[in-house]
Image (cartoon, rainbow, N blue to C red):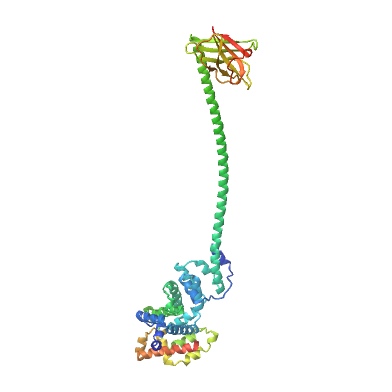
Amino acid sequence: MEEVKTYIESGILELYVLGQLNDQEQREVEVMAAKYPEVKQEMEAIEIAMEQYAIANSVAPSKDLSNDIMQQISGSGTFQSVEVVLNLPPPLEADNTAKVLQLNADSGTKIRNLRIALVACAALLVISVVALFSARTELGDARNQIASLSADKEKFTSTVNFMKQNNEDLQKIVNMNSDPNWKTVNLAGTPMDPKAKMVVYWHVSANHVMMDNSRMALPVNDKDHQYQLWALVNGKPVDLGVFDVNPDTATILVNMKDIASAQTFAVTLEKRGGSPAPTMDQMIVAGNVI
Amino acid sequence: MLLLFLYISKPLATTKKISLSEEELVSKLKLQDTVAIQALYDMYSGALLGVISRVIQQTEVAEDLLQETFIKIWNSAGSYDSSKGRLFTWMMNIARNLSIDKIRSRDFKNSTKNQDIENNVDFIDTQKEITFNADLLGLKDMVKSLKPEYNHVLEMVYYKGYTHVEAAEELNLPLGTVKTRIRMAIIELRKHFN
């Protein structure tokens, strides 16, 4: 403590404040001031005294010197907001508010930017939704078109297939006529239905039996009944299969069961699925092999 | 733009001077906020011009030096270290050093006649408007009550650019005596102000 007191009384602190010390001496004083609060306190007391003394001996500068200095500083280009400070000498209260205003201005700009961004987002959203709906509608239209096109295509395909089949069948019929193995058997209507008629083709060696839908005139059968084709072999009826008659039958030629030999073909109307033996009073057409 | 508008829209008619705490001043100054230099000017231009005028009597030159002082304060704000002393001490030494450099410069010496140290205070007092604070009205008496030899050493060192070593040689005094006299002079000032 005594050491500190001596240090203070040496007058070195006064010389420090008066800028009388060289760099090394200055650093020593700074170390002492940092180490001993008394030294720091003493130094401040000296500084305040010199400051008060200087203030007490103030000399008022010319009125326009302030502007000159501010202009010099603003001309140096090393500071921001030149125009702001040049325009006003703000009072103490104004300085604090000025700072707040600055923040407000900043956040105001931010809020404005955010608002713009928000509006832009909303606009984009609306546009997106509209675009989405329009795309969705177009997609629906496209789907419908595809569906109708594919339905058309199926129709055409089935038509083509049908026509191909018909063509083949017709070709077959033409061939049958020139082939001696094929016998064409015309079945005529019985007294049960004199207008009824149909044609059966029979291959003598291969035993195939076919009906010709295009040359058939039988009444449409109901759901409970079916027509049954018979062959009479030496007076005995042999089942050749059942068939339906409906107006939209696609194919021309219908394969029936094979038969090795036959003298007569006949059709009876039987219960659905056919019968083991023909019901003779239900015979609608019949014809002999010529 | 918005910022500028807000500033401009504030009433400009006010003539109240800026006064900020030292911490605020320092931080604003280091941030190169021109409000700081405006505040420093309002608070200390008189005191600094007082210091400068003690060294150089010509009003025009002194005011040029004051201007130079503020520009230097502005430009070297970054080098101010508050742990090494008060802001005013730093500014005061800038003003004083610029003034002493000026008075020692050749062109200044050529254009002016040197004046006796002793005459300086009286010269300034009669030539310039000294702006005393109301509560410091006893100052003139106080300064006069200082022992002249103490005051003389302080004046030499502080206003005339003598180092304390040079002052000791000039006055033919031991260095310790010079130091003591400077300390005593400042203690007198402290008694008055504290």
Figure quadrant of the N terminus of chain B: bottom right
Residue A276: % across, % down: 58, 17
| Along the viewing direction, whichever of A90 and A209 lies nearer the viewer | A209
- Asked where in the image residue B75 lies, by quadrant, the reply is bottom left
User: From this viewpoint, is residue B111 visible?
Assistant: no
Badge count? 0
| Along the viewing direction, whichever of B133 and B111 lies nearer the viewer | B133
| Along the viewing direction, whichever of B94 and A200 lies nearer the viewer | A200
Is residue A102 placed above or below B83 in the rendered structure?
above
User: From this viewpoint, is residue A206 visible?
Assistant: yes
Residue A34: % across, % down: 41, 80
Residue lying furthest right: A192
Residue B113: % across, % down: 40, 84
| Along the viewing direction, whichever of B111 and A275 lies nearer the viewer | A275
Report the side of A225 relative to A42 (left or right): right
Q: Residue at x 45, y 89 (%)?
A: B187
Is residue A151 placed above or below B88 in the rendered structure?
above
Is residue A249 placed above or below B4 in the rendered structure?
above
Q: Residue at x 57, y 53 (%)?
A: A119
Residue B21: % across, % down: 51, 76
